[in-house]
Amino acid sequence: MTRETWINVAALAVLLGVPLWALMADEPFIITLATRAAIFALAGVGLNLALGTGGLVSLGHAAFFGIGGYAMGILASHAQSYAPIMEAPFLIEGTKSMPVIWLVAMVTSALAALAIGALSLRTSGVYFIMITLAFGQMIYYFAISWPAYGGEDGLSIYVRNEFPGLNTLVPMQFFGLCFAILCLALLLMNAIHKSAFGLALSAARQNETRVLSVGLKPYHLRLVAFVISGAVTGLAGALFADLNRFVSPTMLSWQMSGEIIIFIIIGGVGRLFGPVIGAMIFILLEHTLGGLSEFWHVYLGALLLGIVLFAKGGVIGALAGREKAHD
Amino acid sequence: MLNGLQFGVMLFLMSAGLTLVFGVMGLINLAHGSLYMIGAFAAAAVAAATGSFVLALMASLAAAALAGALIELTIIRRLYDRDHLDQVLATFALILIFSEGTRWMFGSFPLFLDVPPMLAGPVTLPGGIEYPAYRLSIIVIGLLVAVGMFALINRTRVGIRIRAGEADREMIAALGVDIAKLYTFVFALGAALAGFAGALVGAIQSVQVGMGEPVLILAFVVIVIGGIGSIKGAFVGALLVGITDTMGRFLLPQIFALFLEPSAAVSVGSALASMLIYILMAGVLVFRPRGLYGVA
């Protein structure tokens, strides 16, 4: 086992161990924090495929996070009020069933990623950053000015949605669910990394001309990666909305996009577990520094600046060394 | 229409600095919105202390230019050779620091900057339209700045160096131009324009933390439409975005009212209007992926 593998195992152990300890110590709030970390990690794992492996700096991933959140909010609010979403041409009813909600969240955010990606990937570099940011803002403003689902005030759900065989209102059971999904996503990403597709995607980041010359189309590779990435982030959004039982345009805001990138950067770009460690550290900082000072974003900014300027590989890079450098 | 023009001119002041910094240094600067905010806060603070709007405007220029030069010398300078991801992150970190720092110094309540009494009333334009004198003067000032920028870039020695720096930075360094000083100057110039825009807008809207970011994103849209690095593109793009946005908000609800019931027309129209400039941007991208005046 390499050093990075040990770090990865340790990260998962901490993420699972802390809520177990909290369950013993009867600290439900800590379990909620760990759930937040797991969900943020999932969002980061989604983005990491585009950002780390694909080299696509998307500053609009909050769009998918929020679309996932709204998919949950809209379905659950209709189920709550027993009003069908649409009657013609065929009847669609709301639902409180998590698997259905997840599926809808992933499909809608994948479709959004397909549309945004198809346009944005025509460009590259700085243009790509600005355009993903602009499309993210477009959806944000749309959510604010569309009054049917709460507009600026957001949408509240009274009871958490249901998963067969579990009582999701028990914090530990909901955490277990999120943790399991995170592990599945990590397995999926690991498989993608090792697949021919993952290798080609990585190659397209490192040397586009060579990829073209062996007959692969970087545009298609990137678009597929962008869509998968959007779908995973959308799933995280649905879970996040379920955790808070609330969804609002804040989930779509560009600060959210920035935060998802921050998880990846703190942990290490392109590392499988980068977002997991990053999200855990972010939650830890938010909780401890947020308690110390109202202005904790100053410290977060300083830390981020330090990592960017002096420690490029993030935490994993610093601990595991460059044995598997991202490029 | 005039409001659209005024909005467009403001966007030009923002985008000019941004596009210049990108064109010359190849740097994407998210903290540009913070410089806009710093300008507005400096103006509000000086106006409250002295009561003079002219002094407030000068303070906004000075404060933003100073802040710009300071971050260029300490942080931005290290980022020129880094990839865009690092630049995005470092400038995002600067936003966090500036926003929270400003909140810490001035509190979270919005400040207000009064329109100078001389420009407070409306003026009657040829054709009999009444229009606020202050907004009209913003348009005039913005157009003057635009002319000044064109002259600076196309007619002066500094402008020649800036254009040369855009084309080939190693070459002009070899020719004996102090490239580091030039970069600091360009960055401070862009910052000053952003701060100036912040102060001018501060008198129409309130001055508060987070005021810079929505404008920053609009400025990105402008640059994408106009083409990165092109002042002319920034000017055309800014006017296009300003007018599209203002007209869309005004006209779309009315157009939908023709065939929808009034309340639905207002909600559909305003929702669509808020997306209109992004649709415009997508349209431009489909046909000109490098923007209207971008270099292919």
Image (cartoon, coloured by chain):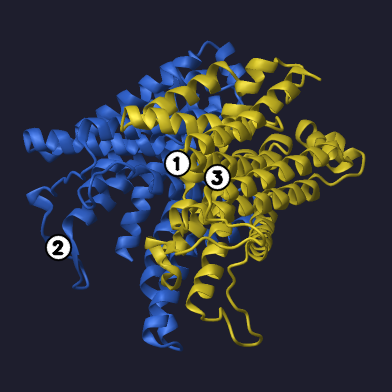
* Residue in the foreground of this view, choosing between B290 and A183: A183
Q: Amino acid at mark 1?
A: Phe
Q: Reply above or below: B145 against B273.
A: above
Circle 2 SS class: strand
Provide the residue designation for mark 2.
Answer: B123
Q: Quadrant of the N terminus of chain B?
A: bottom left
Residue at the (44%, 73%) spot, across then down:
A148
Residue at the (39%, 28%) spot, across then down:
A289
Q: Place residue B107 in its image quadrant.
A: top left
Q: Amino acid at mark 2?
A: Val
Residue at the (40%, 34%) spot, across then down:
B95
- Chain assigned blue: B
Q: Amino acid at mark 3?
A: Met
Circle 3 SS class: helix
Q: Is residue B296 visible?
A: no
User: Mark 3 or 1, which is nearer the eye?
Assistant: 1
Q: Reply above or below: A306 against B119.
A: above
Question: Which residue extends farthest right?
Answer: A214
Provide the residue designation for mark 1.
Answer: A29
Tag 2: Cα neighbours inside 10 Å, few (<14), some, or many (≥20)?
A: some
Q: Place residue A195 in its image quadrant.
A: top right
Marks 3/1: CA distance?
A: 38 Å
Q: Colour of chain A?
A: yellow
Marks 2/1: CA distance?
A: 60 Å
Question: Percent x, y for residue A272?
Answer: 71, 33
Tag 3: Cα neighbours inside 10 Å, few (<14), some, or many (≥20)?
A: many
Q: Is residue A108 visible?
A: yes
Question: Percent x, y for residue B118?
Answer: 8, 50
